[in-house]
Amino acid sequence: MNNNLASKDKEYIWHPYSSLVGKQDNIVITSANGVFLNTNDGRKIIDAISSWWVNLHGHAHPYIIQKLSEQASVLEHVIFAGFTHEPAIRLAERLLEILPGDQKKIFFSDNGSTAVEVALKMVIQYSNNIGKEPGKVIALEGAFHGDTFGAMAVSERGIFTNHFNKYLFEVDHIPFPEEGQEEYCLKIFEEKLLATTVTAFIYEPLIQGAAGMRIYSAEVLEKLLVIAKRNNVLCIADEVMTGFGRTGKLFASEYMTTKPDIICLSKGITGGTMPLGVTACNAKIEAAFLNPETSKTFFHGHSFTGNPLACAVSNASLDLLLNEGCKKKIEFLNKEHKAFKDKIKASKAIRKISVLGTILSIEIETFVDTGYTNSIRDELYDFFLNRNILMRPLGNVIYIIPPYIIEEKELNFIYEAIVDLLKKRQN
C-alpha cells in the first residue's frame, strides 16, 4: 500500500498553501523521532522548522506520549460548557503562573487563528459591555495573524487575503518599526490614535513570522505599548509563534516592561503533539464580562474546547519546558546561531541575517524585492530537501527554528548545507 500512498494523496487530499496542480508528489512520512522525519522510501529528513514551528521537544517524545496515553485511557473528551476536568484546570493554573503581566482568565480554542479570533471578539464585546462604541483595530504592516476572517482582517493585505479583502472589516496598519524607521512608526501610531477611536492594537512581539522572520526591537515595542496604554487602547500580543521559549525567554512579552491585556497562544503549547489554542486575558477584560445579563455573555465556543488530551500533552510539554535542561538547550541554540551568524554574515549571497533566541533567519540576496512570492523559493526548498533537511523558505528567506532537543551534530549538518548554498549563490 505504501507505494500507492503518494498517488492516493494527490487524488484525495487538498493540502494547505498548495496548488492543486502540484509539480511533485507530497512526501509520505511513516514515522518520526526526535528531529527526524522518516519517509516511506527510507529517508531520514531533519525537521529544521519544527513542522511549522510547533514541535518543541522532538517528535514522539516518550514522556509526552506516555501522558497522552494515560489521559486517553481515562477521558478523551467532554463538552466544555457546564463541565470541566483536571487537565484543563491544571493547565490554566500553570499558564497563569508563567504568563507575563496580570493575566487572569484562560479561554481555550483549537489553533492560532482561533486564539486570535477569540481575542478580537473579546475586545469588541468588551467595548459593548462597558457601554462604548467599539473603535478600530490597529496592526503592523506585514502582520500575519491567521486564516480565519477576523485574523485575516488584522493581517497584511496581500497574497493570503486578496480574494477576501472586500469581506474583511477595516483595520488601520502602521509601518513596520524596522531599524531606522522606529520614530516614523511611533509618529504614525500617535496620529492614528488622535484621528479616530481605537479599541485595540494587535502585534506579533519582536518578530513577524510569515512576513519573513522580520525582527524589531523591544525598545520600540515598549514605546508603542506605552502609547497604546496611555490612550486606553487594549493590547493583544500574538505569541502563537513566539511563545514557549522561541525568542530565548518563555514569552517574547517578557522583553518589555509594559504587558499586553490579551495573549494568544498555540503552536508550541502542546509541544507540537496536538492542536490547541489559548486566549489569556487580564482582570480588566474579565471585569467587563462579570455580569449576569445574558447579553453580556461571551457567546463563543468550539466542539473541542478544552480537549483533555490536548491539555494533558500541554501539561507534559510544560514539565519538559520548565526543566533546567531545556533552558540550557535554548541557550545553546542561541549561542550556536550567533556564532554561525558571525561566521557567514560577510557573504555576498546574504542580504540580511538575524538571530532571536532559537530562531536564525537569512535573507538571501536576489537583487529583487524580498517577499513570499520571490521566485527563488522553490529552488531553496529543493536545495535543502535534496540534502534531507526540511526548510520551508518564506520566499527568499530561509530560517532555522528547530526542536530544542536538536544535537550539535544535526545543527552543524544544517549549517554546512547553508554554507554550501551561499557558496553556490556567490559563484
Image (cartoon, rainbow, N blue to C red):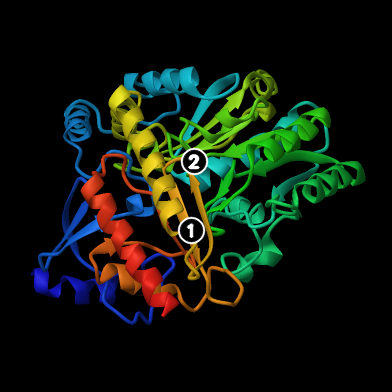
Q: List x then y, in percent, for residue 252.
A: 54, 35
Tag 1: amino acid: Lys
Question: Can you tell which quarter of the image residue 163 is in?
Answer: bottom right
At label 2, counting other C-alpha atoms closer than 10 Å, the crowd grade (few under 14, some 14-19, many 20 or more) is many
Identity of the residue drawn at 36% across and 53% down = 49
| Secondary structure at numbered mark 2 | loop
Does residue 290 appear left or right of residue 269 in this picture?
Answer: right
Q: List x then y, in percent, for residue 62.
A: 16, 35
Residue 379 in sight here:
yes
| Secondary structure at numbered mark 1 | loop
Q: Give me the disc on residue 242.
A: 2
Which residue is denoted by mark 1 in the rendering? 345
Identity of the residue drawn at 39% across and 63% down = 392
At label 1, counting other C-alpha atoms closer than 10 Å, the crowd grade (few under 14, some 14-19, many 20 or more) is some
Q: Give me the disc on residue 260.
A: none
Tag 2: amino acid: Thr
Q: List x then y, in percent, for residue 180.
A: 73, 52
Count the labels in the image: 2
